[in-house]
Image (cartoon, rainbow, N blue to C red):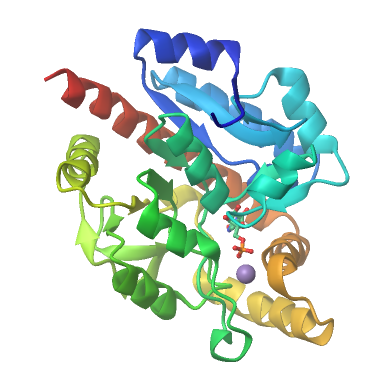
Amino acid sequence: MPPLTFAPDVQAAREAGRPLVALESTIITHGMPWPKNVEMARTVEADIREAGAVPATIAVMEGRIHIGLTEPQLTRLAQAGEVMKLSRADLAVALATSRMGATTVAATMICARLAGIDVFATGGIGGVHQGAEQSFDISADLQELAQTRVTVVAAGAKAILDLPKTLEVLETLGVPVIACGQDAFPAFWSRDSGLTAPLRLDHPQDIARAHLMRARLGLPGGQLVANPIPPAAEIPADRLAPLIAQAQAEAAAQGISTKSVTPFMLSRLFELTEGASLAANIALVRNNALLAAGIARALVAERRL
Ligand code: PSU
Ligand code: MN
């Protein structure tokens, strides 16, 4: 039996068959600075409730996978200095040794699946890093999408990544990449990466049906739903490009590698954009939470048919 602890409201939702949306915690501990991180987490949870679903923020504490955090747990996690960043490789070690850990997209998918939650909202997924032909830095998030049956709603992937290579790897792994509301694959802070997404579905009901169809076909793996940032919150790609290049050069000069690459790039960009990247980040996560709630509701309705 996996060591799962459900928050009381999540447990009640499970028993009543209400729609649930999983949320990751690495975005809180390694993706945004205190106290904006905890404010974002609370706001996104409230958004999901308002949209008629129940949020379940996932993290590892005291040897248990928590599916849904209480308010004190959320604050403790957001404020803690030493939190492990947990991907598939790290989950069991963190649990076995009772370390506090925040789940990435990959680990959140694993935990959501164990908890029977089909839909997960985040900001951006990990992908193929620029220079991966040298560094081999490809996020475990991509492989997880290929093997764990959870629909992940993200605003595409950041321009700190190599987006064409990220789409190529997803195609190789057989992961459906579905743009919502447009043909273009979105690039996190910008609505259009200049690349066309392989698939497009504009309605939560269709995304829910495709999720269920994968199960009927016996296909493992999830779906990546790429939801563009709202127009008002967008940051033009040409404003970010030189700042991304600068942060990348600093990362290389300082020998930043493996798990530290993404957090380093995120925090440097927050500094270099004087907080503008953070405001956009929060807007897009909220937007993804709303779409995820719609998909979760549609799944409940489809299963009742
Ligand atoms: N991209 C973002 N914000 C994030 C992350 C990615 O725009 O917070 C986090 C997510 O938790 C993602 C992880 O799963 O970073 C990927 O890390 P890595 O590249 O080390 O696999
Ligand atoms: Mn990596």
Q: Judge whether 245 appears above or below 167 on screen.
A: below
Tell me which corner region of the image, top left, top right, bottom left or bottom right, holds residue 50: top left
Quadrant in which the N terminus is drawn: top right
Direction from residue 76 to residue 126 in the image, left or right = left
Which residue shows up at 39% across the image and 49% down it? Answer: 148
State the count of labels. Answer: 0
Name, please, the residue furthest toward the left: 305
Tell me which corner region of the image, top left, top right, bottom left or bottom right, holds residue 250: bottom right
Q: Position of residue 157 (x, y in %)?
A: 48, 63
Name, please, the residue furthest toward the front: 1
Where in the image, quadrant-wise, is ligand 1 located?
bottom right
Q: Judge whether 80 appears above or below 3 on screen.
A: below
Q: Is residue 31 visible?
A: no
Quadrant in which the C terminus is drawn: top left
Name, please, the residue furthest toward the right: 81
Q: In this orientation, which residue lies closer to the viewer: 124 or 116? A: 116
Q: In this orientation, which residue lies closer to the viewer: 78 or 187? A: 78
Direction from residue 226 to residue 302 in the image, left or right = left
Q: Position of residue 101 (x, y in %)?
A: 73, 43
Which residue shows up at 67% across the image and 65% down it? Answer: 262
